[in-house]
Amino acid sequence: MRLRLRQFRPRVGLVEYRVVQPRSPLRHTALADPLGEYGVVVGDHDGLARLAALFSFAAYSRRTVVHVPLRSGVPLDDETFIDASGGRVDLVLMHHSLGLRPSAWPRVRRRLTAGTPLTVETREERTERDAAAWLRQSGHRDTREWLRPVTYARTAFLIGSRGVFAAASSEFAYAAGRGLREPDALKGYLALVGSLTHELPPDDSLRPPELDITFKARRPYHRFKHP
């Protein structure tokens, strides 16, 4: 998939970071805090498909921060559901090895000005291969390759590495395709079409973090056609 991005090179102290954002916002997509009442992504086909591509890009961009602004999207019919689930947050994807602390993010975010256009192509075959490799070893609780969620400054950080980002990308791609086939999509109902909870670290607490993926067809619903 071709991704049209905007690239920034903010400097904080002596360190320069590379940050990319989607050039056009995911206007019909929202994320409720994974560490809140109920972590959930609500998105239309375009939003879920582009999230699949952004996770794929993040998998192979070890030195890049992927920032997806989601707080200012179009209000959804189910906005009260998002509010009750923990409220809208932005999304940041980054590798463990980058060493950027979430507490430093507000300083980085303030410097995201004067970006330059960037176009990249994701390779679905490579993503699927690495996703399958991660799934084969993900049953071992001692693995360190998880999506570790942190919430700070109204931003949900998913911190991981190549394999688990690839697995998340595949889950979003599947969810985008499945959403179009849900029988009640034409009526505008939310449909649970996937989950990233399996990619989060094992947690035996009474309320472990979770992150489900739901599909929401874009209005007007009468123009929506099943494939």
Image: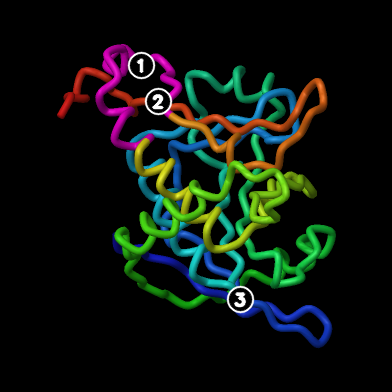
Task: Give the crowd class for mark 1: few <14, some 14-19, many >=20 residues within 10 Å.
Answer: some
Name the mark on residue 24: none
* Residue 140, image x, y percentages: 64, 45
Residue drawn at x 36%, y 71% as measured from the top left = 120
Residue that carries the numbered disc 1 in the rendered image: 188
User: Residue drawn 27% across and 28% down?
Assistant: 180
Q: Are marks 1 and 2 in contact (CB under 8 Å)?
A: yes
Q: Tag 2: residue type? A: Lys
Q: Amino acid at mark 3?
A: Arg
In the orientation shown, which residue stands out farthest toward the bottom? Answer: 14
Label 3 – label 1 distance at C-alpha: 39 Å
The picture places residue 167, in percent across and down from the top left corner, at: 48, 49
Residue 176 colored in magenta in the image: yes
Give percent across and percent down for residue 172: 42, 42
Q: Is residue 179 above or below residue 25?
A: above
Q: Disc 3 designates what residue?
A: 63
User: Helix, strand or loop at disc 3?
Assistant: loop
Secondary structure under tag 1 reads loop
Residue closest to the eye, 226 or 58: 58
Q: SS for tag 2?
A: loop
Q: Amino acid at mark 1?
A: Gly
